[in-house]
Image (cartoon, rainbow, N blue to C red):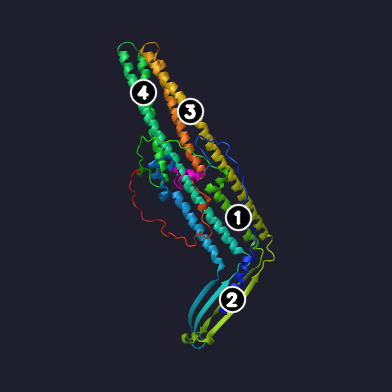
Amino acid sequence: MRRLFCTGAVAAAAGLSACTVGPNYRRPSAPVPAEYKEAQPQPGWKISQPSDMFNRGAWWSIYDDPVLDGLERRIDISNQNLKAAAAALAQSEQLVAEARSGFFPTTDVNLAAQRERPGGGLPITSLFTDQVTASWTPDFWGLIRREVEANIANAQASAADLASARLSAQGTLAGDYLQLRIADELYRLLTRLSKDYAESLRITKNQYAAGVAAQSDVSQAEALWYSTQAQAVATRLTRAQFEHAIAVLIGVPPADLTIAPTDYYIQIPDVPPGLPSTLLERRPDIAAAERTMALANAEIGVQVAAFYPTISLSLDAGTEAATIAKLFQASSGFWSVGANLVETVFEGGLRHAQLQAAIAVFNQDLANYRQTVLTAFQQVEDELAALRILAAEAKVQDDAVAAAREAVRVFNNQYLAGTVAYTSVVVAEETELADLETALTIRENRLVASASLIQALGGGWYAGELPSPAQVKATAPLNFNPLPPRVPVQGQGPS
């Protein structure tokens, strides 16, 4: 009978592949432009894949900053958002294993021993049982296959979500780090100008002592000197906040991270965007939206399969005897084999409503997918426009800085010659300071825009990094110690 059950199971399985109800998934179209509107090739540019430009997985290396490189590489190790996303991926992999278990029979083994005194003068009796029970619901209509398909798509979407979380953390860290370095540059600028203004104050005081300058000249020189010092102090707050944000991104308390100031000047990189058609394969959030859509498509198949009857097979076999010695005799054996077909004939429209709901979810995910694609192109175009326009602005601003510096030189000479009031010198110096700060702000915006553009292009990621159905692990390791003993973190800055 066991052989009969197995033979029937194999025969049933042989016919499964011919009947999987529900729609087969095909990736829907998405709006893709032929070229980027805001991309105006610069000298030396060529049409290229983003991965040609960015080191795979370490796109921040384009800035050639060892401190940034060290910080970025700590994200995968300690970032708590990434750990949460990784745990979600592990959970989705286990759901695939759970769904796959439906392909196999459920088998129970029951060993029992019972001794009973029934009363009424009847003798004491014993009963020993050795029983095997097996049941199986063949996947005639593809219900289990659709569930596995849905869970594989969900696992792939979780893998894409993990990549999105990683890219987001990397991009945020890069932006914070670049702004921190701009704060260092601003501090150096204000410190240098403060020394220049201190020298102007010294000269003005000497002239006042000699009777050739007014007290108001001294007061104006002092005001400019103190104001510049105050601005220099204020940059420390901005820098400290960026340093604290970076600490959280790499998963350490802010007190445990110190990023030493440096004179390193970060160059603004050229970032060729490549072809728009490649963006669909370069953005993990687009991949996640597409896999979510595939999941919803498989769920439609699950609901369609619910309209078909459920067929199950069962086997119950074993031995039963009053003594252990007789338990293994052939005469003590028993068995039963059965088949069961269940079809729901009335449920008030429940299955139809569930099917229509699944179709509505798919349509919602389809719209979300296309919106994700549109948003991705918008982000790329925004950053391309920012880089192009900021580059033009920087050129004009550099001319403004040069003119302001020349004005300071001329007015200083005229003041020393006694032909203009000191007010003219102060106004020229304030204009120079404002122009220098504006130029530095433009430089900061260009650096941040370059990092945002690389992030918008996917940061070197590509859809081929998603696990294939065969690669989705069915036995991902589990960590049953969610709160390990605390280990003190050694406070140290990046080397």
Q: Amino acid at mark 3?
A: Lys
**Residue at label 4?**
225
Q: Nearer the viewer, mark 4 or mark 1?
A: 1
Give percent across and percent down for residue 321: 51, 85
The kind of secondary structure element at disc 4 is helix
- Mark found first going from the N terminus, 2 or 1: 2
Q: CA distance from mark 2 to mark 1?
A: 35 Å
Q: Taking 291 as reference, is 181 above or below it?
A: above
Q: Taking 449 as reference, is 298 above or below it?
A: below
Q: Are marks 3 and 4 in contact (CB under 8 Å)?
A: no
**Residue at label 3?**
395
Q: Amino acid at mark 2?
A: Thr
**Residue at label 1?**
296
**Residue at label 2?**
7
Give percent across and percent down for residue 78: 41, 49
Instruction: Please tell me in which quadrant of the rendered image residue 377 appears.
Output: top right
- Mark found first going from the N terminus, 2 or 4: 2
Q: Residue at x 47, y 26 (%)?
A: 397
